[in-house]
Image: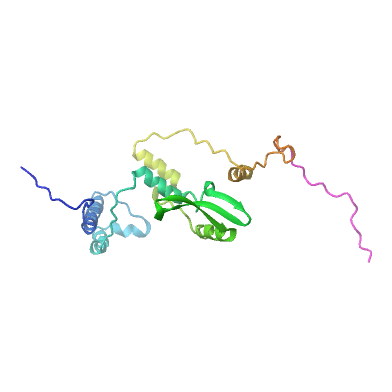
Amino acid sequence: MAAAGVACRPGFFLPVAVLSRLFRRLFLEGLQRAFDAGELRFFSSLEWLHDPVAFRRYLDPARQVNWVVYAKPPFAGAERVLEYVGRYTHRVAITNNRIVDIEDGKVRFRWKDYRNENRQKVMTLDAGEFIRRFLVHVLPDGFQRIRYYGFMGNRYRKQKLARCRELLGMRQSDTPAKPKEGRDYRDKVEELTGVSLRECPFCRQGQMACIEVLAPVASQDPPFLDTS
C-alpha cells in the first residue's frame, strides 16, 4: 500500500482555523471522557455539574464558539522560552548592568535596536524622564505579577503538594527544608550600589559590627516648674 504526499509552500504546517476546530473537538472530548470516568471533581458553586445532563449543557456553548489557537514554533527550544518569560516575571524594566552613567541629572543606558539588526546603542535621558519610563513598568497597588492557582495556590499549597506526591508515589521527605539565611538592608544596598555599609567610613579597612544597643538614659535634671 502506497501513500502519496501533497506538497505545500515552505514553512507552512497547517491552517490555523482547522487546527482551532481540531483542538476544540479533542479538548472537549477529553473533558467528556474524564467526566464519564469519574475523574472530575466539582466543589462549591460548581457542584451542580455532577449531573451528566448539566455537564453536557455546560459544554454546549463552548462547541459553538470559534476557538483561537496560536501556533508557532518556540524561538530556540523550551529553555529559551522560559528564559524570555523569566526576564519579565522576575525583573523590572532594566537591569543595573545596562546603566552606563548617572551624572549631571542625566542617565545613560544601553538598549537594543531591534530595527537595526539588534545592535547595542546608548541612550541619554533626563533623570526625571528616565524615572517616568521606569515607573511605567511598576505594577499599580493591588496588582500581582505572578499568581498561583490550583495546587500551587498559597493557602493550601503545602498540603496539596504533599497529596500530589502521594498520588504520584513519591517518597515524602522527613527532613524539613532549611530556612534561607536572612539578608538585611546592608546586604541589599551593597548588592545594588557596590557600597558596603559595614565598612568603617574613616579608615576604609575595618568592618563595622554591632556590639551592643544602649537603651536611652532618662534625664536626671529636675523637672521644669512653671511659676507663672
93 and 139: which is toward the camera: 93
Quadrant of the frame with the C terminus: bottom right
Residue 11 falls left or right of residue 223: left
Residue 136 drawn above or below residue 174: below
Place of residue 216 in the rendered image (x, y in percent of width and height, measured from the top left): 79, 47
Residue 143 drawn above or below residue 34: below
Place of residue 42 in the rendered image (x, y in percent of width and height, measured from the top left): 33, 54
Q: Residue at x 12, y 48 (%)?
A: 5
166 and 95: which is toward the camera: 95
Q: Residue furthest right?
A: 227
Q: Residue furthest left?
A: 1
Residue 203 magenta-drawn? no
Residue 24 drawn above or below residue 80: below
Extent of the magenta region: 212-228
Place of residue 16 in the rendered image (x, y in percent of width and height, measured from the top left): 24, 57
Q: How is the image coloured?
A: rainbow
Residue 146 seen from this side: no
Quadrant of the frame with the N terminus: top left
Q: Residue at x 22, y 58 (%)?
A: 21
189 and 50: which is toward the camera: 189
Residue 227 magenta-drawn? yes
Q: Residue at x 94, y 64 (%)?
A: 227
Question: Toward which corner of the image does residue 129 lie, by quadrant?
Answer: bottom right
114 and 44: which is toward the camera: 114
Residue 64 falls left or right of residue 206: left
